[in-house]
Image (tube, helix red, strand yellow):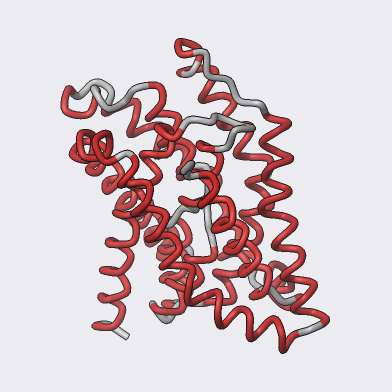
Amino acid sequence: MSTIFIVLPILTILMFDLGLALQPNDFKLIAQRPKPIIIGLIGQIILLPLIAWGLISLFIHIPFFAHSLTPLFIIGIMLVACSPGGSSSNVFSMLAKGDVALSVTLTACSSIITLFSLPLIMAWVTSHVGETMNIHLPIGKLLVQNIVLMVVPISIGFVLNIYRPHWAARLHSILKRIAMPALVLLVTIFFIQHRQTIVAEFGSLGLMMTILILLTTACGALLAWLFGMTIKERRTLVIEIGMQNAAQAITIACSPLIFNNEIIAVPAIIYALMMNLILLAFVGLTKLHP
C-alpha cells in the first residue's frame, strides 16, 4: 500500500485540528504581541532553511555524511526544513507549559506563509541538485495541493469553532490525542516499507537530523533570550523553531502530483523520530525547572 494514502488523511486531520484550536483572538495576538511572532516566523521561515542548507554544504565534504547526501536526500532534508509548524507543536507547547496561544498563532501564520515560501525555496533547491536526476518541482500543483490539504481543513475547523464552539471543543479534545499516535503509525508503516534504506542511512542522516534539530532549537532559545521573551514564550519559540511539520514534508515527497518519490521522504521520517525524542527530553527538562 502506498504511503500517500496514509499520510494524506493524517495531514488533513492535523490541519483540521489546528483550525479547531484557532480563535479570532489568536490573530489579535499579532497586533498585541508582534515581537515573539516575528521572531518565531523569522526562525521558522528564514533561519531554519539557511541552517539546513549550511549543514548540507558543510557535510557534503565530510566522507561520513557525503554518501548520504544524494540529490534525493538533499531535497528531502530541505523539504523538512521548509515545512514549519504543525499541530503537534501546540501539544508540545502545552506539555512544556509554554505559551499555547502563541504556538497556535505561529503555526497558523507559518502554514499560510509556507504556501508561498516552500515552493520558492524548493524550486531553487531542485534547480541546483535535482537536474542531474531529472527532478523538477511543479510549483502550480504544489500550491493547489497545499491549499486543498492545509488551507481548506484549517478554514473549516476555524469556521466551525466560531459558529459551533462546543462541537469544535469536543472534536479538538479527541483529535489532539490522536495527533502523536497518527504520526507514530505513519513512521512505523514507512519504516516497514523502507527499512533497508532507513537502516543503511540512519547513522549519517540520523546524526545530521539530530544536529539540525539541536541547532534550530538552540537558535530559538538564543533569539528568545536576546529579545527578552518571557519563560513561556521562550519555551514555545524553542519548540516552534525547532519542530517541523514532517507530515507535510512526507505528503509532498510522496504525492503523485509533486515528487512521487518515497525515498525523498526518508529524511522526514528520520527527522520525525529524532525530533520527538529530543522534544520529549526538552519537556522533561521543563518539568525539572517549572
Q: Give coordinates of residue 57: x percent, y percent.
A: 34, 25
Residue 281 screen position, x and y as percent:
26, 68
Q: Quadrant of the C terminus?
A: bottom left
The residue lying at 65 percent from left, 62 percent from top is: 108
Side (left or right) of 172 relative to 217: right
Image height check: is 117 above or below 57? below
Q: Residue furthest bottom?
A: 166
Residue at x-position 61% and y-position 70%: 17
Quadrant in which residue 180 is drawn: bottom left
Q: Residue furthest right?
A: 163
Residue 198 image offset from top left, x and y in percent: 27, 39
Q: Relative to 138, does residue 185 appear above or below in the rendering?
A: below
Residue 240 visible in the shown view: yes
Q: Residue at x 45, y 18 (%)?
A: 129
Question: Which residue is depicted at the point 72% across and 89% down?
Answer: 166
Identify which residue, 238 or 228, lies in the foreground: 238
Query: Camera-side residue: 215 or 81?
Result: 81
Outermost residue to the front: 1
The number of callouts visible is: 0
